[in-house]
Image (tube, grey):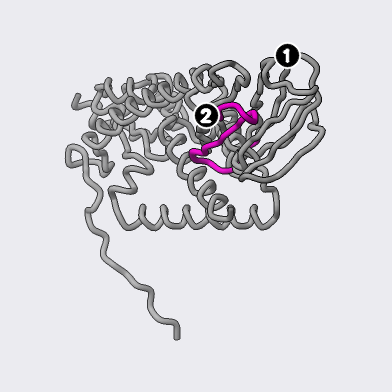
Amino acid sequence: MAIFVILRAVFGYLFLVLMVRIVGRRPGKQLTPFEFVLIFYLGGLTLTGMVGNEVSLTNAVTQIITVALCHYILAALRYRFDAVAQLLDGTPLILLEHNAWRAETLAQMRIQDDDVMDMARAQGIKDLSGIDTAVLEAFGEITIIKRDDNDAEER
Amino acid sequence: MPAPPFLTPVEDSVPKVNNEIAIGENLDFQRKWWRLERAVWSLFLLILICDLLGLFGRGWLSKATRATPDNTLKLDYERIERADTPSIMTFHFGPNAIHNGRIQLYVSESITRPLGAQRIAPEPLISAVGDAGNTYTFAATNAPATVQIELEPSFPGAHDFTVQVPNEPPINAKVFVVP
């Protein structure tokens, strides 16, 4: 039935959004091979259930439009309500500030000091003492704010 | 002349940390999210365990057997089926089911639709429609004798069905089809 085609597309989209959100963000500017496997495998498995044995062009077009509409609605809600934005994207998280690690955040987000130092090196920072604040952004990248030289001298 | 663009003044709308850097961290929300994540992972684990046990079909809990009091007809089926997934319903006939080298089996229409009967093995000699179902006649020698119907249900939900050997008590059962 046509309604099941649409419901399957809606469920598949929302389920994938939930899965990707729950699996969690990993630091890095690009997807690692490990994450490529996860994304493509999840997508492929969802596709099987969404399409079922209805392989017509009409079915494909209907489901693509449904997914596009779902995405549009979520994006609109995300723009309109901060609470939805937090639910969908999460919130930036401080990993290190003023020479102290946020141990709870690091453990919960499964991030190691090496991950922070990777990003610091990319900005020419030689060691962790050169970092004022490290932030895990909602989109997964770690932002490093360098310590001012004056700051370092004061401390 | 083009209309001027809409402009609004920049305000300090992103919360700052230590009154220095605008980061917008919300640790209270994040702690709630971490709790939710743990609950969801537990739920995922529970779903997998239920699946392995057969609560969503194709497992130990989904298998069912029903029989008439004198075992003239014994039925093996799956009480929980998955939509668009093949399964086998097996009928075992006792000696009382065989008359003059023939076995007759009545199955209600729900076996054909919505439970989606695809194939019967062996092929019946005669298929007769009526009484809200189909009556199949098979050639038979001696008991034990077995007939299988391959099902592939298309419609999720609970579906009742009836099977019967004529002049014997019917077997009424229910199959729940998960999406």
Residue A27 point in image, percent of width and height: 44, 30
In this view, the mark in front (2 or 1) = 1
Question: Is any atom of residue A67 visible in this view?
Answer: no
Disc 1 packing (10 Å; few <14; some 14–19; many ≥20): some
The residue labelled by disc 2 is B80
On whether disc 2 and disc 1 are found on a single subunit, the reply is yes
Cα distance between the residues tagged 2 and 1: 29 Å
Question: Which callout, 2 or 1, points at the residue further toward the start of the chain?
Answer: 2
- Residue at image position (50%, 34%) is B176
Q: Chain of mark 1?
A: B
**Magenta residue check for B169:** yes
Question: If the image is split into quadrants, where does the N terminus of chain B sit?
Answer: bottom left
The x and y percentages for residue A102 are 26, 24
Q: Amino acid at mark 2?
A: Ile
Residue hosting label 1: B143
Residue B35, located in which quarter of the rendered image? top left
Categorize mark 2 by other alpha carbons within 10 Å: few (<14), some (14-19), many (20+). Answer: many
State whether residue A81 is above or below residue B148. below
Tell me the magenta residue range. Answer: B152-171
Quadrant of the rendered image containing residue A111: top left
Q: Amino acid at mark 1?
A: Ala
